[in-house]
Image (cartoon, rainbow, N blue to C red):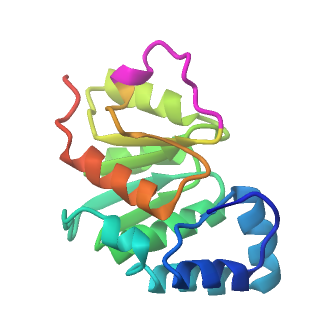
Amino acid sequence: MHLRTPCNFDCIKRACCRGIQVRVSRQNFFQNSRSVGRTDLLLFLSNNMHSQDMTQRTELHCSGKRVLLVDDEPHIRELCQILLENGDYLVDLVADGEEALNALSKERYELLITDHLMPKISGLELARQLRLNGNHIPAILISGDMPVHEPDLRYLFSAGSLLAKPFSISQFLGAVDETLRSPRLPA
């Protein structure tokens, strides 16, 4: 079910409890989560991972894998962090590509998840800089405005690692699992 109009927490809760796959657009999620308590909604979603989305998840258990999540929107970072930590990933959060480059120079990560349109350095430019410096970390690009006409997009991101917003919980977790299982991009 894709919620195209503003909805409230009870509507989302009823749908999740019935096992209905829920997609909430960024605008609807944030408009409504402010009125009902964003933390309540995030906690509800994380506590109900055993619903349809969780049963569709593959059996890849990634206990302890480190993920760097880059997004300029705090609400998206928080939601994705909850989903990943519920799957036993260790998650570090940064707000833009510049912070990501700094974090990647200090720590080793198994996966990079980055938004595309961000201040300072875009997700696409972040991936370009990493590849030019010899860092071939598996990466997922998430965006409401996917740069499909960029000639090097397929070189920078492997198949299955482009995720258009809005996305469902199962699409997000599926992209993480698939990207981690895919062979690394060539050096």
Magenta region, mostly helix, strand or loop?
loop
What is the quadrant of residue 162 in the picture? top left
Q: Is residue 28 magenta?
A: no
Q: Is residue 147 magenta?
A: yes
Q: Which residues are magenta?
A: 145-155
User: How many numbered dots are placed on residues in this image?
Assistant: 0
Question: Residue 107 placed where, x, y %?
Answer: 30, 53
Q: Looking at the picture, tell me which residue is in the foreground, 82 or 120.
A: 82
Quadrant assignment for the C terminus: top left
Q: Looking at the picture, tell me which residue is in the foreground, 122 or 133.
A: 122
Query: Can residue 108 be seen?
Result: no
Question: Residue 148 placed where, x, y %?
Answer: 54, 23
Residue at point 20%, 40% (across, down): 182
Query: Can residue 51 be seen?
Result: yes
Query: Residue placed farthest to the top in the image?
Result: 151
Residue at point 42%, 31% (across, down): 127
Quadrant assignment for the N terminus: bottom right
Question: Residue 10 placed where, x, y %?
Answer: 71, 86
Q: Is residue 31 above or below residue 86?
A: above
Q: Is residue 73 above or below residue 39?
A: above
Q: Is residue 184 above or below residue 53?
A: above
Residue at point 24%, 49% (across, down): 180
Question: Residue 95 placed where, x, y %?
Answer: 58, 53
Residue at point 19%, 66% (across, down): 59
Q: Is residue 125 left or right of residue 131?
A: right
Q: Is residue 37 left or right of residue 75?
A: right
What is the quadrant of residue 79 in the picture? bottom right
